[in-house]
């Protein structure tokens, strides 16, 4: 069904102005500003789903990411779910529900671990909202927002104490990240949640089978956390009241006290707080060489104390590959985790990149011989982003126009009319 | 007798007081210091990550000075921490045509330490690969060409590189081995695991402690 036909059949939602108040100290074009908001939501569970429903009423653009599927217990806390939804991927199910509620903005969905996505997937968002209990995901999303300089809103609950919390990180280079506030308990919980199996080795990736505990909370506590997060997002988008960036907001249902405190960077935080300057290039990155990309980044050739390095989307540079019969053979191309890189000339079995000779990021000196070959000739034609790093500066090169889904995991477009 | 005594004294390592946790007290040789300085000049990443890599590199070089069976050949601190090292350790290799186990005496190890390992647990197979010899026949070592060594189902965040070296020695000499092929963790070569289950009398290949000069 064409978009035009779909729009003709699906009634347009009412204008936000019909119910949006004139906020004290607010701007006259508040409705338009909210409609322009682009938000990436990580976690489509009990808290995230509520946030998404609120955001959808603004209009705007939404990206939804969640690795999980709806379980029978999800019906206890997830709004707009029923028995027929059990087993469905959470992000897709939420997308369908948003369309059924009349959301007609741009909608993108990723049913899988958010860690599979590249930086480019979040480059167009104004804000990232995190609504998950998974600590690894928190670290990863926090790192993405630091690199991209994106604001991060983290909503969470502690069911036993009826506490709702919202952390708003500005994404500035001197600001904190979720890990800055981690105590020993959180680091231990991260260790406890993370498990690996040797099937991850076979897949060619350090894939963790995270096992965070389910959110033990009431549905209304989850919606309270979502509502508080939305209030912070509204104030941020419209500049209402005191700045909410780099603040921690907590409400306790036992005492009905609300506390607001500043969030500061922890100098001992082990996470990388380097911000990446973003540069948008016309055409496809795959057609460019690493030398051209370095020039576009405005970083000189490798000199001084720290050499240059490249991170090409989700690709790793494989110096060597091998087969049981032919030993190690030079390869010199970019590969994805678990990707077969060719056939052994002797036995015709697939050869694999040697893990010791896989580089991500790859130092410029390792790829010196191929600096002048376009990325597509090096196996990375599908790359949507390239990060170039030198000294304490880092630049993220992106394509000016985002391309349809390719070989690397990415958000997929959710059409206006979809079943 | 006197000459034998002198020979043993030649190879007895001078372990600092505090043992392997006091490697920072070991004064690096001129060659090792030069190697460390050369690598540090090319060290990339954030400040905290650069400091960590430098500290790990120094510890590894100090370890090589006090452990006769361990030598660092190359190090790379540009991005991911990488080192090539020789380890004198019995390495079980594919049995010959008569079913007799081959045991090599020297392993060339590839050690990799990613930045995330500082604050996140990592899979046990993510750190060490046996580059030589080929054909390692061990339940916890993947088959050629990767030959990754599994040092446990999950290694804690911030594990030290010297701990990886010690664990690798224990694994290859089979002083510490997991060979239940039904277990999801640790067994990277199920065929070897089944073979070794029938030959437990050969395990371990060595009882010699890491710092001892013997085999």
Image (tube, coloured by chain):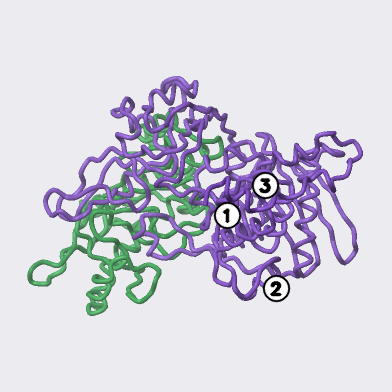
Chain colours: A purple, B green
Residue A97: x percent and y percent?
64, 60
| Image quarter of residue B181 | bottom left
Work out which quarter of the rendered image holds the C terminus of chain B and state it. Answer: bottom left
Q: Secondary structure at mark 1?
A: loop
Q: Residue at x 21, y 46 (%)?
A: A328
Q: Are marks 2 and 3 on the same chain?
A: yes
Residue tagged 2: A76
In-front residue for pair A208/A155: A155
Residue B127: x percent and y percent?
39, 53
Residue B130: x percent and y percent?
28, 54
Instruction: Chain letter for mark 2, please.
Output: A
Residue A394 in sight: yes
Q: Secondary structure at mark 2?
A: helix
In-front residue for pair A231/A400: A400
Q: Nearer the viewer, mark 1 or mark 2?
A: 1
Q: Residue at x 54, y 36 (%)?
A: B46
Residue tagged 3: A180
Residue A75 left/right relative to A325 = right
Q: CA distance from mark 1 to mark 3?
A: 42 Å
Residue B109: x percent and y percent?
30, 50
Which is nearer the N-term, disc 1 or disc 2? Answer: 2
Q: Nearer the viewer, mark 2 or mark 3?
A: 2
Which is nearer the N-term, disc 2 or disc 3? Answer: 2
Q: CA distance from mark 1 to mark 2?
A: 28 Å
Which is nearer the N-term, disc 1 or disc 3? Answer: 3
| Image quarter of residue A100 | bottom right
Residue B59 left/right relative to A215 = left
Q: Nearer the viewer, mark 1 or mark 3?
A: 1
Q: Are marks 1 and 2 on the same chain?
A: yes
């Amino acid at each position: 069904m064409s978009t035009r036909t779909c729009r003709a059949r699906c009634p347009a939602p009412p204008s936000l102005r019909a119910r949006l108040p004139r906020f004290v100290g607010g701007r006259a074009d508040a409705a338009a500003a909210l409609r322009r908001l682009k938000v990436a939501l990580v976690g489509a569970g009990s808290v995230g789903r509520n946030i998404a429903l609120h955001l959808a009423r603004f209009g705007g653009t939404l990206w939804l990411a969640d690795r999980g599927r709806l379980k029978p217990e999800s019906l206890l806390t997830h709004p707009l779910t029923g028995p027929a939804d059990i087993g469905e991927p959470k992000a897709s199910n939420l997308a369908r529900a948003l369309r059924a509620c009349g959301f007609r903005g741009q909608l993108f969905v990723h049913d899988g671990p958010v860690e599979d996505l590249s930086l480019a997937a979040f480059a167009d968002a104004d804000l990232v909202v995190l609504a998950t209990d998974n600590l690894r995901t928190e670290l990863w999303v926090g790192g993405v927002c630091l690199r991209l300089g994106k604001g991060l809103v983290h909503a969470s609950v502690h069911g036993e104490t009826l506490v709702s919390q919202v952390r708003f990180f500005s994404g500035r280079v001197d600001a904190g990240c979720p890990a800055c506030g981690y105590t020993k308990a959180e680091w231990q919980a991260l260790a406890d949640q993370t498990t690996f199996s040797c099937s991850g080795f076979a897949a060619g990736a350090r894939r963790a089978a995270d096992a965070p505990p389910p959110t033990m909370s009431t549905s209304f506590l989850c919606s309270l956390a979502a509502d508080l997060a939305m209030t912070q997002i509204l104030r941020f988008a419209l500049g209402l009241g005191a700045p909410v960036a780099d603040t921690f907001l907590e409400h306790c249902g036992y005492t009905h006290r609300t506390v607001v405190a500043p969030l500061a960077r922890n100098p001992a935080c082990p996470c990388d707080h380097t911000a990446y300057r973003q540069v948008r290039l016309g055409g496809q990155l795959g057609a460019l060489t690493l030398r051209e990309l370095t020039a576009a980044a405005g970083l000189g050739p490798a000199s001084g104390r720290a050499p240059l390095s490249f991170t090409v989307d989700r690709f790793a540079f494989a110096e060597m590959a091998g087969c049981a019969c032919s030993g190690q053979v030079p390869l010199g191309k970019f590969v994805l985790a678990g990707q077969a890189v060719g056939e052994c000339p002797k036995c015709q079995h697939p050869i694999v990149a040697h893990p010791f000779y896989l580089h991500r990021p790859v130092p410029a000196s390792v790829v010196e011989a191929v600096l002048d070959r376009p990325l597509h000739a090096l196996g990375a034609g599908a790359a949507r982003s390239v990060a170039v790093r030198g000294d304490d500066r880092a630049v993220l090169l992106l394509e000016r126009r985002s391309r349809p889904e390719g070989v690397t995991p990415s958000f997929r477009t959710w059409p206006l009319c979809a079943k | 007798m006197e000459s034998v005594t002198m020979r043993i004294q030649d190879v007895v390592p001078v372990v600092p007081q505090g043992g392997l946790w006091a490697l920072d007290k070991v004064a690096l040789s001129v060659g090792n210091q030069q190697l460390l300085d050369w690598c540090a000049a090319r060290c990339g990443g954030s400040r905290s990550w650069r400091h960590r890599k430098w500290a790990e590199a120094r510890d590894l070089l100090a370890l090589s000075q006090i452990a006769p069976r361990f030598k660092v050949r190359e190090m790379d601190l540009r991005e991911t921490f990488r080192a090539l090292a020789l380890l004198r350790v019995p390495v079980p290799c594919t049995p010959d045509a008569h079913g007799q186990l081959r045991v090599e005496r020297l392993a060339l190890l590839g050690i990799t330490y990613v930045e995330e390992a500082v604050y996140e647990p990592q899979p046990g197979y993510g750190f060490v690969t046996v580059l030589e010899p080929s054909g390692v026949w061990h339940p916890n070592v993947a088959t050629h060409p990767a030959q990754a060594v599994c040092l446990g189902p999950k290694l804690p965040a911030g594990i030290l590189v010297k701990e990886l070296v010690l664990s690798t020695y224990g694994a290859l000499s089979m002083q510490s081995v997991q060979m239940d092929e039904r277990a999801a963790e640790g067994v990277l070569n199920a065929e070897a695991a089944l073979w070794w289950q029938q030959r437990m009398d050969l395990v371990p290949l060595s009882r010699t402690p890491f710092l001892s000069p013997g085999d």
